[in-house]
C-alpha cells in the first residue's frame, strides 16, 4: 500500500511539473494538443461539419457586436446617398441627350490653375426637368495629344441639377466630358438588387482523398439541407461553406474555382436601363473644347513631398504626358532599387496589386523568384534580391476570390490574419487592395472585411508604429462589364466605404479610382504606365 501511495504521489508530482512547464513555455497548456488536430496548412481555419440538416438557409456567422454596429453605420451613410427613386417607364428616367450642360462664366481663353464650373440640368426622355438627383455621373477633362487627363468633381444638389467642377491643370485645348453612367432610377434599382442574394457566383471546391478527387458546391451562404463543411475564421467570425463530400473529411479541400450564374434581381424593365447603349452616354455634346493658357500667372508655390497620412484633394491629381502629378503634394524622382533596399514589401489582395509584382520584376532585373511549391497563375509569389536584401511577396486575399481558373486554398488566409502574424518594423511595408472580387455580393460583406482589416492594422500599428501601410483603391473597369455583377457603380460604393473606414489611420492611400478615371483606361488591369504611376506614389510614400 505504501509503495502504491508513493507511486500515486510521484505521478501527481510529475503531472504538476509537466503542466507548469507547458504553461510557462506555451502560456496555454492546451495549445500543444490543439496544434495537432489539423494539418498545418488548414490549422488556421476552424473546420466545423454541420451534422444536422438545417431547415433554414445557413447565414453568415455573426461578427462581434461592435463590428456589426459599424457595418450598419457605414451602410446607413451609403443608403442616405442612394435613396429609392421611382421607376415607372423608361421615358421618365434621365436622358443624356435631353439633359443640358452649361459652362458657367465662359471665356475665350481660360487660365491654368483656374476652376471651371459646369451646371448640369438633368431631364428625362420627354424633355421634362428632373426633380431629384442620384444619377451616376463621371466627369473628365482631357487633351489626347498631350496624353493628359483629370477627373472632375460632381456635386449633386438633389433637385435634378449638378455642379461639375474642373481644375485646369495644363495649357492647350482641353475637352470636357460628363458621362451619364446610369440614371438615378437605375442606380436605385442596382442598390436594391445588390442587397439580395449571394448566388450570382457559384464556387466549386475540389477535395482530394488519396488518389481520387471529389468536387462539390461551395459558397459564402449555402441554402442546403445536406451536410456542410464550415471554414470559419474564429477571430472575426467570417466563414465559407462547402457541401461535404461523402466519406471525405472537410480538411481535404485543396482547390477552388468559380463561374457566373444567370441570376438577376432586376425586373425586365429595369434591365433595359443597362443595355450597353445606355451606359456611359455623353452629356456635354460637341461644343466641349475650351482653350487654356498660362496667362502669365505668378509661379505656384512649391508643394511638400507626398507622405503617409496626408489627405488628398479632389481631384487627387492629373496626368500629363502619361505621368501622374498629385494635386496636393509633390513627387520626387526616386530610384526604385535604392528605395526598396533592405525592405520587405507585402502585397496583399487581388490581381490589380499582383500587377505591381509584375512591374517590380520587369523593372529590377536582379530580383529572383523563389519557388514556393505552388502551381497556377494565382499562386503566392515571392521575389528576392539577396545582395540588396529586397523581398517582395504577393498573396491573394481569401474568399470570395472569383476566377474560372482553379487555385489552391491550402495556404489561403484572410488578410487580417496575415497582418496579425506580421511583426512589423520600419522596413516592413504592407500594401492592400480589396474590392473587385466583392462586387457581386451584398456590400455588407465588403464593409465587414474592410473593418476587420482596419482592426488588424490598428493592432499592428500599436505594436509596431514604424510599419508602413499603403491602401490602393479599386481601378475603374470596362464599360461592358455586367453591371449587376461587376459594374463600376458597385465599385464606387465600395470606394466610398473604404475611404470612410480608413480615414482615421495613418496610412498612405493611392487613389487608383481617381487615377484610372483621369487616365481614361476603363480597364480593370490598366496598362504599364498607369501601374508605374501608382508605384511611383508608393515609392514616395516609403522613401
Image: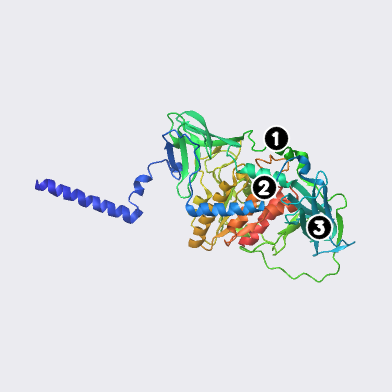
> Is 36 located above or below residue 16 in the figure?
above
Q: Earlier in the sequence, mark 2 or mark 1?
A: 2
Q: Which quadrant of the view contains residue 338?
A: bottom right
Assess whether mark 3 and mark 1 are in contact (beta carbons under 8 angstroms).
no
Instruction: Report the residue marked by disc 1.
Output: 268
Q: Earlier in the sequence, mark 1 or mark 3?
A: 3
Q: Residue at x 34, y 45 (%)?
A: 33
Q: Label 2 vs label 1: CA separation?
A: 18 Å
Left or right, residue 356 beside residue 229: right
Instruction: Report the residue marked by disc 3.
Output: 118
Residue 107 point in image, percent of width and height: 88, 62
Q: Residues within 10 Å of mark 2 (few under 14, many from 20)?
A: some
Q: Residue at x 54, y 43 (%)?
A: 399
Q: Which quadrant of the view contains residue 24?
A: bottom left
Instruction: Report the residue marked by disc 2.
Output: 84
Please tell me whether mark 2 sits on a helix, a strand or a loop.
loop
Q: Nearer the viewer, residue 310 or 153?
A: 153
Residue 157 point in image, percent of width and height: 73, 57
Q: Label 3 vs label 2: CA separation?
A: 26 Å
Please tell me whether mark 1 sits on a helix, a strand or a loop.
helix
Outermost residue, right side = 108
Assess whether mark 1 and mark 2 are in contact (beta carbons under 8 angstroms).
no
Q: Residue at x 81, y 61 (%)?
A: 116
Residue 234 point in image, percent of width and height: 45, 47
Please tell me whether mark 3 sits on a helix, a strand or a loop.
strand
Disc 3 versus disc 2: nearer the observer = 2
Disc 2 versus disc 1: nearer the observer = 2
Q: Residues within 10 Å of mark 1 (few under 14, many from 20)?
A: few
> Is 337 located above or below residue 94 in the figure?
below
Q: Earlier in the sequence, mark 3 or mark 2?
A: 2
> Is 298 located above or below residue 432 in the figure?
below
Amino acid at each position: 500500500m505504501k509503495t502504491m501511495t508513493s507511486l500515486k504521489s510521484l505521478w501527481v508530482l510529475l503531472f504538476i511539473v509537466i503542466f507548469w512547464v507547458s504553461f510557462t513555455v506555451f502560456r496555454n497548456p492546451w495549445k500543444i494538443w490543439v496544434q495537432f488536430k489539423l494539418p498545418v496548412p488548414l490549422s488556421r481555419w476552424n473546420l466545423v461539419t454541420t451534422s444536422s440538416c438545417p431547415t433554414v438557409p445557413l447565414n453568415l456567422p455573426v461578427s462581434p457586436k461592435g463590428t456589426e454596429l459599424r457595418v450598419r453605420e457605414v451602410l446607413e451613410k451609403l443608403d442616405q446617398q442612394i435613396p429609392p427613386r421611382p421607376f415607372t417607364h423608361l421615358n421618365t428616367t434621365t436622358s443624356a441627350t435631353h439633359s443640358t450642360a452649361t459652362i458657367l462664366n465662359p471665356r475665350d481663353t481660360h487660365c491654368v490653375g483656374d476652376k471651371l464650373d459646369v451646371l448640369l440640368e438633368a431631364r428625362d426622355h420627354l424633355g421634362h426637368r428632373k426633380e431629384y438627383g442620384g444619377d451616376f455621373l463621371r466627369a473628365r477633362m482631357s487633351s489626347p495629344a498631350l496624353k493628359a487627363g483629370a477627373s472632375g468633381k460632381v456635386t449633386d444638389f438633389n433637385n435634378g441639377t449638378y455642379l461639375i467642377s474642373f481644375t485646369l491643370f495644363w495649357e492647350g485645348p482641353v475637352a470636357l466630358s460628363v458621362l451619364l453612367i446610369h440614371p438615378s432610377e437605375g442606380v436605385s434599382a442596382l442598390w436594391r438588387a445588390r442587397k439580395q442574394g449571394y448566388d450570382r457566383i457559384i464556387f466549386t471546391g475540389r477535395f482530394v482523398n488519396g488518389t481520387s478527387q471529389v468536387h462539390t458546391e461551395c459558397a459564402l451562404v449555402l441554402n442546403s439541407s445536406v451536410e456542410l463543411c464550415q471554414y470559419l475564421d474564429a477571430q472575426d467570425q467570417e466563414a465559407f461553406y462547402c457541401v461535404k463530400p461523402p466519406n471525405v473529411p472537410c480538411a481535404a479541400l485543396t482547390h477552388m474555382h468559380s463561374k457566373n450564374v444567370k441570376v438577376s434581381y432586376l425586373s425586365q424593365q429595369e434591365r433595359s436601363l443597362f443595355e450597353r447603349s445606355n451606359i456611359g452616354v455623353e452629356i456635354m455634346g460637341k461644343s466641349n473644347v475650351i482653350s487654356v493658357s498660362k496667362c502669365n500667372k505668378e509661379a505656384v508655390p512649391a508643394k511638400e513631398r507626398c507622405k503617409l497620412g496626408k489627405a488628398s484633394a479632389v481631384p487627387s491629381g492629373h496626368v500629363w504626358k502619361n505621368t501622374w502629378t498629385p494635386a496636393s503634394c509633390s513627387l520626387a524622382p526616386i530610384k526604385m532599387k535604392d528605395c526598396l533596399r533592405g525592405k520587405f514589401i507585402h502585397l496583399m489582395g487581388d490581381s490589380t496589386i499582383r500587377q505591381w509584382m509584375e512591374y517590380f520584376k520587369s523593372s529590377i532585373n536582379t530580383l529572383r523568384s523563389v519557388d514556393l511549391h505552388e502551381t497556377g497563375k494565382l499562386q503566392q509569389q515571392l521575389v528576392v534580391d539577396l545582395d540588396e536584401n529586397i523581398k517582395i511577396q504577393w498573396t491573394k486575399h481569401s474568399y470570395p476570390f472569383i476566377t474560372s481558373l482553379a487555385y489552391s486554398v491550402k495556404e489561403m488566409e484572410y488578410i487580417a490574419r496575415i497582418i496579425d502574424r506580421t511583426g512589423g518594423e520600419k522596413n516592413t511595408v504592407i500594401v492592400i487592395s480589396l474590392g473587385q472580387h466583392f462586387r457581386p455580393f451584398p456590400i455588407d460583406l465588403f464593409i465587414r472585411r474592410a473593418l476587420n482589416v482596419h482592426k488588424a492594422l490598428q493592432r499592428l500599428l500599436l505594436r509596431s508604429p514604424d510599419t508602413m501601410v499603403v491602401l490602393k483603391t479599386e481601378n475603374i473597369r470596362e464599360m461592358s462589364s455586367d453591371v449587376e455583377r461587376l459594374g463600376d457603380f458597385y465599385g464606387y460604393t465600395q470606394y466610398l466605404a473604404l475611404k470612410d473606414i480608413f480615414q482615421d489611420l495613418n496610412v498612405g492611400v493611392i487613389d487608383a479610382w481617381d487615377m484610372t478615371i483621369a487616365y481614361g483606361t476603363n480597364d480593370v488591369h490598366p496598362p504599364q504606365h498607369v501601374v508605374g504611376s501608382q508605384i511611383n506614389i508608393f515609392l514616395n510614400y516609403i522613401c
